[in-house]
Amino acid sequence: MTLRTIVGAENIQAPASALEVLYADAALAVVNKPAGLMVHDSALARGETDFAADRLREQFGRPIFLVHRLDRATSGCLLLAFDRDSASALGKSLMSHDVQKEYWAVCRGWPAEAIFTVDHPLDGGPGKPQKKPAITAFEVLSRCELPLPSASFETSRYAWLRASPQTGRFRQIRRHLKHLSHHLIGDSSHGDGHHNRNFRMQGIHRMLLHAQRLVLVHPHTGARLDVHAPVDTEFAKALALFPAPTAHA
């Protein structure tokens, strides 16, 4: 069951820059972060002044504590808490892998297996060369073949995937797909420029990675929260290129 109850939402004055609230109560909230919005200020901001954290403080009218992060180009479920105790409890749940995170991704090519796991160590990103274990489970939800030339072929093949990271390494899903040569579409850092251009020709200019589902146990009530984030217009346009998934999406 997907919970979308918003407690006290009538008291929240939502500005034009407000993020979609998927679930909220006195202790925590899950919002739908749009692609292109940085979660918080960091060394990667490079002069950026618009951050999800600042918008959310204004939107909820109270302090917020980010429980996890999403890359700037990634959209979807973003978990936050309204007090330190709740944030600490949720953080421990994440560290112990008690929080289930599912992403939708579109990649180049057709993976050989419908269900597969990538177990490939990754470093921590710039300035963090030490490699640590990194595991991502993938499921192919649908496949399509478009009349777009690719190398010596007259068509290009793509797959719509569900990705479930078992660890939380820097750009893990994107880098694991690159490791398989099934590059994530729209990824300017780890993707394939030719296939990115194919999708831009379809009017799809964003990176096709979306945090679609978050499942967790409420730190205070023990209730199971199962929250889904709808995709934006461009991502929906990409998914419309595929037949309906044969697996439950």
Image (spheres, rainbow, N blue to C red):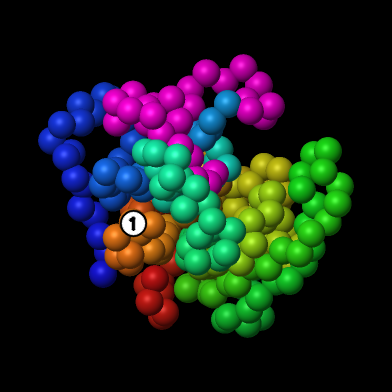
Taking depth in this image into account, of 78 and 8 the one nearest to the observer is 8
Residue 49 colored magenta? yes
Give the labeled residue for mark 1. 220
- Residue 152's x, y, as percent? 75, 64
* Rendered view: 24 above or below 159: above
Q: Which residues are magenta?
A: 42-69
Q: Report helix, strand or loop for mark 1.
A: loop
Residue drawn at 24 percent across, 55 percent down: 4
At label 1, the amino acid type is His
Taking depth in this image into account, of 232 and 72 the one nearest to the observer is 72
- Residue 117's x, y, as percent? 66, 75
- Residue 219's x, y, as percent? 38, 57
Residue drawn at 26 percent across, 47 percent down: 25
Taking depth in this image into account, of 48 and 208 the one nearest to the observer is 48
Residue 45 colored magenta? yes
Residue 19 in which image quadrant: top left
Does residue 5 appear left or right of residue 164 in this picture? Answer: left
**Residue reaching furthest right?**
129
Q: Quadrant of the N terminus?
A: bottom left
Does residue 169 appear left or right of residue 85 in this picture? Answer: right
Residue drawn at 64 percent across, 62 percent down: 167
* Rendered view: 86 above or below 83: below
- Residue 126's x, y, as percent? 80, 39
Residue drawn at 64 percent across, 56 percent down: 168
Can residue 98 be seen by looking at this rendering?
yes
